[in-house]
Amino acid sequence: MKPTVHDIAKIAGVSLATVDRVLNDRPGVRAVTRSKVEEVIASLGYVRDLAAANLAKGRTYSFTFILPANDNSFMIGLHEEVRGAIARSSAERTDIRIVDVPPFDPEALVAALDKVLAEKPAGVAFVAIDAPDVRAAAGRLREAGIPIVTLVSDLPDSPRDHYAGIDNIAAGRTAGSLMGRFLSDPLTGGQVRYVTVLAGSMLVRDHRERLEGFSTVIHDNYPDIRILPVLEGRDDPALAETTIYDALRRHPDMAGIYSLGAGNRGLIRAVQKAGTPRRPVVIAHELTASTRAALMDGVIDAVLNQDAGHEVRSAIRVLKAKADGLPVIAAQERIRIDIFLKDNLP
Amino acid sequence: MKPTVHDIAKIAGVSLATVDRVLNDRPGVRAVTRSKVEEVIASLGYVRDLAAANLAKGRTYSFTFILPANDNSFMIGLHEEVRGAIARSSAERTDIRIVDVPPFDPEALVAALDKVLAEKPAGVAFVAIDAPDVRAAAGRLREAGIPIVTLVSDLPDSPRDHYAGIDNIAAGRTAGSLMGRFLSDPLTGGQVRYVTVLAGSMLVRDHRERLEGFSTVIHDNYPDIRILPVLEGRDDPALAETTIYDALRRHPDMAGIYSLGAGNRGLIRAVQKAGTPRRPVVIAHELTASTRAALMDGVIDAVLNQDAGHEVRSAIRVLKAKADGLPVIAAQERIRIDIFLKDNLP
DNA sequence: CAATTTTTGAGGTACGTAAATCAGAATTTG
DNA sequence: CAAATTCTGATTTACGTACCTCAAAAATTG
């Protein structure tokens, strides 16, 4: 059977208390004794029974999720997933709290992080904003020994333990590749096509990265496709609608649209209203009620999606593992870019 | 704090033993007393602490995985993932065993299922073969109260508890949609193109379903694409190579190939060797070393993939939940169809 | 070498549940 | 109404670990 602390004590010829001191890094053990015990632990292949340990500790993992109070479908969905996790938390010894912060506001995020730090939770997950102050606040948390996971939006070059989100450069590249393939003409070819990109804001890292990936692929592989200057829709459906509508009026021959942010409701309306002679190829992000309907109707050709539920569950798993000092299964925690066509909608 | 059995006993005015009898469906409790206790349980919102319960029971979940002893990359990968789970199992109170069976052999599978039944494991996962005898054997397991999960290949109309695998019709539809889009010519159009399908065997349900989805989408949406009679490569690289090579010699203008089974190593060699004037669009299944390389080289255009690791972990989670009588998080257990282009390779 | 400090042992309690025993109470049966 | 049966309560042990106390042994210091 699985070895227990008692087995270790017996074989090492020490008392249970000493084994406990070694296992939990408590003082009061001579170096010789310590190494002897450690040897036995290794030779037996002992692994601490986490369930029993947590039971004994009466421990509950208290995690805090700091989320922007955005009202787009994706963020609302993210909130819901966290609430779902909270509902399930009773059975899992976790106690999860949500802290809302105003969106796109680095100072508010820093304030929230510092406030959370004072509460000494067992782990923190937050949607990062790419700013030096945020990086510093994250450093303070790590300093205090609190594991950190960034969610949806990463904070590179920071001491975060993990990023639970998609690779946005790869997402942009995928969009570019699909756009290129959907537009390419294997027989004739050579005609110049115009593609427009609708972003939320170029101040957001995710959007910058998606654009970067998209542009690279188009430039490198599809020389007859030209990307028009980026339009900013501030993730707002109304603004997106007028912006895209105007663009389609100016370029009735627009071959494609890549919407790399939110506010797709407006984009869809604009495309339908404009009624251009040849409907442009549209690739958008995040599967919501409206993008799903547009996919079915043929207004959108492909949707790249990140599964908020997976991101939340992954963040919790990672925080738990970090809190226990356990390794994470990397393959399990990689958040994949889902590609949805109208034929593989779940 | 979380209510415990002690709280229930105190509030219901009964002893701990009675609460235990109610909770674990043991006899020896009057109906009145039972309902009183159940009322208190409900009113307190009591949930049993699984960790403590399992600790007390000294329980280890013993699961059996029945896997075909195929030697293609996918099945080898599946084996590896199960072995990986076994390596991790010490920490998770699971004891997983692998039983190998000859591939595509319903009788051998039935024999294995019956042998496993005799060992009364806490759950069984197996790669199903679509045959009445297999269905009956699965019924015997369920009869014995053993949870069943089908892996990779489903067994519809059987009493299995769960299927951990992709929707193969949707996969075929996706392949059809990508093929149609990659081949379609938005400006000219109208020319007839020929596409060939390489399957392992039409006797396998997965392959039949993929073909069905593929054909449906092509017929309904891309009338100028014609599907040639299905080629069977028996999932064998050598056979696939000669089959495809011959086909490309006969049809040098072949526009596309959909490989819905295994043996892609041979397919790739055939396409490279044939050197047709215009390389056909190739869509294949399962990301392996060879399909990955072919994607990078541009020989394959898209790979549809099912993540064996996710399937195995999902199967284990579901078996555990069923063994504990807990609900499963459906969204978490849905196995997704990954679409890989050369731009989003992990 | 005595005084002090450090290390170790022994033992206990606790976490929340499972499962068992045994005795007493309530109920049913003849 | 006695006997048999069925319920119920009280109590105990166990699971594997954490953490506490107290005393004894060993090592270190002055």
Image (cartoon, coloured by chain):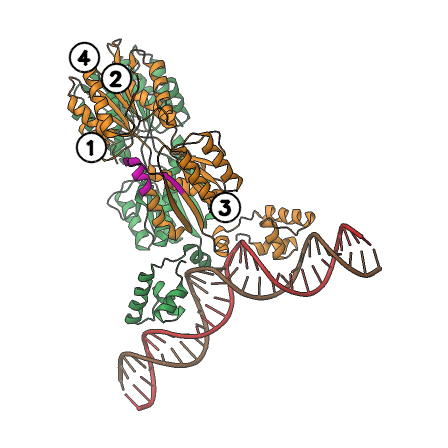
Chain colours: A green, B orange, C red, D brown
Residue bearing mark 2: B183
Bounds of the magenta segment? B65-80
Do the dots labelled 2 and 3 sit on one chain?
yes
Image: B345 above or below A44: above
Q: Quadrant of the N terminus of chain A?
A: bottom left
Q: Taking A338 as reference, is B112 left or right?
A: right
Does mark 2 fall on the same chain as mark 1? yes
Q: Which chain carries label 2?
A: B
Near mark 1 (Cα within 10 A), the count class, few <14, some 14-19 or many ≥20, is: some
Q: Pointer 1: what residue?
A: B293
Disc 4 versus disc 3: nearer the observer: 3
Q: In the image, residue A272 lies at what x, y percent?
A: 36, 15
Which chain is indicated by disc 4? A
- Label 3 amino acid? Asp
Separation of residues labelled 4 and 3 (CA atoms): 61 Å
* Residue B73 inside the magenta-drawn segment: yes
Q: Position of residue B29 (x, y in %)?
A: 66, 51
Could you tell me if the residues under marks 4 and 3 are in contact, i.e. CB atoms within 8 Å? no
In front of the other: label 4 or label 2?
2
Residues at marks 2 and 3 touching, judged by CB atoms closer than 8 Å: no
Mark 2 and mark 3 lie on one chain; the one further toward the N terminus is 2
Residue A188, label in figure: 4
Q: Mark 1 lies on which chain?
A: B
10 Å neighbourhood of mark 4: few (<14), some, or many (≥20)? few
Q: Between disc 1 and disc 3, whose residue precedes?
A: 1
Q: State which chain disc 3 sits on.
A: B
Mark 3 closeness class: few <14, some 14–19, many ≥20 residues within 10 Å: few
